[in-house]
Image: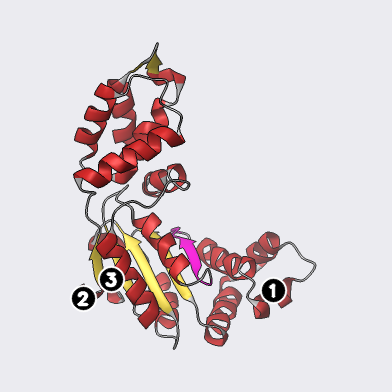
């Protein structure tokens, strides 16, 4: 449930511009350049995933993006698949002529751990772990080695420090923590305008919807985008009017902690 909620904004606003967060983007770009670890904290929809994808752009697309999952073996398989998809030559050489997904799922966790450690040691990269929630001790021990590998830069994102679980032992320094703030009024309005264009809402009456959306979202970009996305669904429209109350209820259900 937690993971599904955390993915709402990521799936809805992928094609929208990254609006605002100038200070946060500068901090991220600096951390990538200096190979410094960084932790992003914020509620669901705050924009953490978009900022992490900005970090990948700063790393010239050579980073590894991982969506956290609680099953350790699945997390390892995902890591290995990302290395293969990213063209990591030592790993790709092992799966020539094979289905990477099937190959990864058939490996043991011990084999995958050794493979990934050797891979990042031979070609260090930016490693991003998004949506961390209650990480276990084995997850911590695995990423501890990744974290301290020379040349590796590791970013993580979570709702709050408690959500890190055992990974709080790595991301404990407040100097390496960015608390993602809500958008200011101008940024929120700009995102609303981009989202209405993206989802084709101009045929609808947007005056009251705009006001209520911006008031309820309180600068949360994920909520702004999700409300606009749902407004394109005929189930929330009567004539040219958007049925805000049921739409808002469904959006809030997706963003509850």
**CB atoms of marks 1 and 2 within 8 Å:** no
Which of 18/153 is in front? Answer: 18
Q: Position of residue 135 (x, y in %)?
A: 36, 64
> Does label 1 or label 3 sit earlier along the sequence?
1
Q: Dot 2: within a 10 Å radius of its alpha carbon, few (fewer than 14), some, or many (20 or more) residues?
A: few
| Residue at 32% from the left image edge and 64% from the top image edge | 25
Q: Nearer the viewer, residue 87 or 189?
A: 189
Can residue 256 be seen by looking at this rendering?
A: no
Q: CA distance from mark 1 to mark 2?
A: 37 Å
Q: Nearer the viewer, mark 1 or mark 2?
A: 2
Residue that label 2 marks: 175
Q: Residue 235: horizontal and vertical position, in percent?
A: 43, 19
**Which type of secondary structure does the marked residue at label 3 adopt?**
helix
Residue 50 in percent (x, y) is at: 39, 55
Q: Is residue 113 above or below residue 250?
A: below
Q: Which quadrant of the view contains residue 206?
A: top left
Instruction: From the top left corner, tell me how far across and down residue 200 is, in percent.
Output: 46, 29
Q: Nearer the viewer, mark 2 or mark 3?
A: 2
Secondary structure beneath label 1: helix
Residue to which mark 3 is pinned = 168
Is tag 1's residue or tag 2's residue first in the polypeptide sequence? 1
Q: How far is the residue under mark 2 from the one under mark 3?
A: 14 Å
Stretch of the chain drawn in magenta: 62-70
């Amino acid at each position: 449930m937690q993971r599904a909620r955390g993915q709402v904004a990521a799936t809805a606003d992928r094609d929208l511009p990254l609006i605002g967060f100038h200070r946060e983007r500068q901090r991220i770009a600096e951390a990538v350049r200096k190979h410094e670890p960084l932790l992003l904290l914020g509620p669901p929809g705050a924009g953490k995933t978009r900022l992490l994808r900005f970090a990948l752009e700063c790393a010239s697309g050579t980073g590894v993006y991982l969506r956290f999952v609680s099953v350790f073996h699945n997390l390892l398989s995902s890591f290995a698949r990302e290395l293969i998809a990213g063209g990591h030559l030592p790993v790709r050489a092992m799966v020539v002529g094979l289905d990477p997904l099937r190959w990864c799922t058939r490996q043991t966790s011990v084999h995958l751990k050794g493979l990934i450690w050797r891979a990042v040691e031979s070609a260090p990269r930016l490693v991003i772990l998004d949506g961390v929630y209650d990480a276990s001790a084995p997850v911590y021990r695995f990423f501890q080695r990744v974290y301290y590998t020379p040349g590796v830069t590791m970013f993580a994102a979570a709702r709050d420090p408690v959500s890190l679980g055992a990974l709080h032992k790595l991301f404990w320094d407040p100097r390496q923590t960015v608390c993602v703030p809500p958008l200011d009024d101008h940024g929120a309005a700009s995102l609303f305008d981009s989202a209405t264009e993206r989802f084709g809402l101009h045929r609808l009456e947007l005056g009251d919807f705009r006001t209520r959306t911006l008031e309820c979202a309180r600068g949360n970009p994920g909520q702004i985008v999700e409300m606009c996305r749902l407004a394109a669904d005929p189930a929330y429209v009567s004539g040219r009017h958007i049925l805000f109350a049921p739409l808002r209820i469904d959006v809030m259900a997706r963003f509850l902690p």
